[in-house]
Image (cartoon, rainbow, N blue to C red):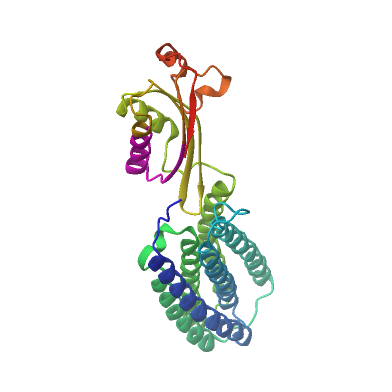
Amino acid sequence: MAHSHSHGDHNANRTRLAAAFSVTALFMLAEVIGGLLSGSLALLADAGHMLTDAAALLMALLAVQFARRKPNARHTFGLLRLTTLAAFVNAIALLVITVLIVWEAIRRFTHPQPIEGGLMLGIAIAGLFANLLSFWLLHRGSGEKNLNVRAAALHVMGDLLGSVGAIAAAVIVMLTGWTPIDPILSLLVSVLVVRSAWALLRESLHELLEGAPVNINIDKLARELKLNIDEVRNVHHIHLWQVGEKPVLTLHVQVVPPYDHDGLLRKIHHYLHQHYQIEHATVQMEYQACSLPDCALGSEHAADDDHHAVLDGHAHHHH
């Protein structure tokens, strides 16, 4: 199973994640202290995001480390799925912390708290720069292809909005003394973060439940194999899933008995790799029609193609 990323990419991801984690953890502590001293919920909300950021970054860091381990007899795909699991946990953590912030914000409307605007503003500005630095670190290189680095960047993005909200709230409190702006802005930030976290939760859950990669249409893949490779008569028993960032495919193809069996197999593998970036495919070639009920999976025209079958009762399983 070939790696889609070089070790250079993994090392760069690890270095970026480690740097972003250090920056985030440091400023999370600053915001917790600042939030408690100034009485600002917007700062504490931001610190809450930063706490999940730090956890997200730490998990992403561990996941990148585990993903480098070679496959073995017990884990034949290696530990690539850990990156997806980390993204899933991150999304849930962010949703939970957002619920706590919303709860506290609602409580603040009925029991307003005094806020030290100057201290709040200073901490919020420092937090904004820390988030900008983390976001920049995570958005360079191959991060956009890695669900886990993207999960971490999503956390920081929510946090960036939190810092902007905290700055705005601090300015309004200093100019007008109107403290309800603090919980109002923490609620607005929460709504934006929930939207991102929900998308991440759906995507990681889809992968954990062995869903097919969203960018590959199975019916289209089956049709194109028949159209572009003359010997292929029918495609069925298609199973497509994803491990880490790698699509994995198994399928049965009913073919005209080829003059060069291995050549045809190479042609199918080459087509899958060229057009669908599938490097790991198990193709079973059959020379007679498939009559089982689920043969139509991935091919709308299985029945129509049965008359093309050539009665040669050999099936080959190749990897």
Q: Please indicate whether residue 44 sits to the left or right of residue 162 in the image.
A: right
Quadrant of the image occupied by residue 37:
bottom right
Rendered position, 121 above or below 102: below
The x and y percentages for residue 186 are 56, 69
Q: Residue furthest top?
A: 307
The x and y percentages for residue 98 are 61, 64
The x and y percentages for residue 236 are 48, 26
Rendered position, 271 above or below 27: above
The x and y percentages for residue 108 are 65, 72
Rendered position, 247 above or below 295: below
Front one among 6 and 195: 6
Q: Please indicate whether residue 250 sits to the left or right of residue 256 in the image.
A: right
Query: Magenta part mainly helix, strand or loop?
Result: helix
Q: Please indicate whether residue 183 sits to the left or right of residue 154 in the image.
A: right
37 inside magenta stretch: no
Magenta span of residues? 265-282
> Residue sitting at 56 percent across and 68 percent down?
62
> Residue sitting at 49 percent across and 22 percent down?
314
279 inside magenta stretch: yes
Front one among 187 and 28: 28
